[in-house]
Amino acid sequence: MLIRDVRQDDAPRLLEIYAWYVEHTAVTFDEEIPAPEAFAGRMKATAEKYPFLVVEDGGAVQGYAYASPFVGRSAYRFSCETTIYLAHDARRRGYGRALYEALEDRLKAMGILNLYACIGDPVGEDEFLTRDSERFHRCLGYAKIGTFRRCGYKFGRWYNMIWMEKLIGEHR
């Protein structure tokens, strides 16, 4: 397993990973796959300011994780949002933990203190969304801090969204 910084030539594979979640799950509330140029642009903009990492195994990219601004105002500069996507057939192999640990190390070095994860949450588990992401984040030390009820609508049904938080530094 190799964790490295994202490269622009990773865009097609990362979009392929993300597209599966758009088409088959409510993990993301995107309902249409982003255009390749738009997706590559998002990657570039994110990687200019925050860590954007990929995990490779056997020479193939199996997933990615990145940080992005939390809210976007300067007073929040010690906080960020974390995001992770693994190839749908590459889960439960340790890639997610390895990516998030590497991401957290980079963020600590940047002076980030608070991590936030915005997670789709089923009203009742169904074929499009489970609570796996919440369980994953909880195992890594995140705590659930809020619920937005029935705020996302996809596949003809309503979904909640939860926020989870992890404090990784001392607030002085």
Image (tube, rainbow, N blue to C red):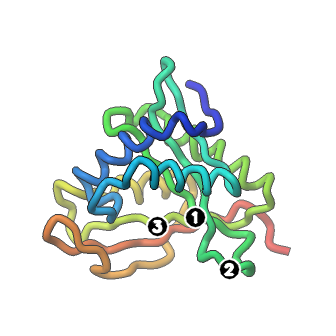
- At 40% from the left and 55% from the top, the residue drawn is 133
The tag on residue 118 is 3
Q: Quadrant of residue 20?
A: top left
Q: How many neighbours does mark 2 have within 10 angstroms: few (below 14), some (14-19), or many (20 or more)?
A: few
Q: How many neighbours does mark 1 have within 10 angstroms: few (below 14), some (14-19), or many (20 or more)?
A: some
**In the image, residue 91 lies at what x, y percent?**
38, 37
Quick one: label 3 or label 1, which is nearer the N terminus? 1
Residue annotated with mark 2? 73
**In the image, residue 13 lies at what x, y percent?**
42, 35
12 to 60, vertically: above or below:
below
Helix, strand or loop status at disc 3: strand
Q: Are marks 3 and 1 in contact (CB under 8 Å)?
A: yes
The tag on residue 81 is 1
**In the image, residue 15 lies at what x, y percent?**
40, 44
Quick one: label 1 or label 2, which is nearer the N terminus? 2
Gap between marks 3 and 1 measured at Cα:
8 Å
Identify the amino acid type marked 3. Answer: Cys
Residue lying farthest top?
A: 58
Q: How many neighbours does mark 3 have within 10 angstroms: few (below 14), some (14-19), or many (20 or more)?
A: some
Quick one: label 2 or label 3, which is nearer the N terminus? 2
Which residue is nearer to you in this view: 31 or 133? 31
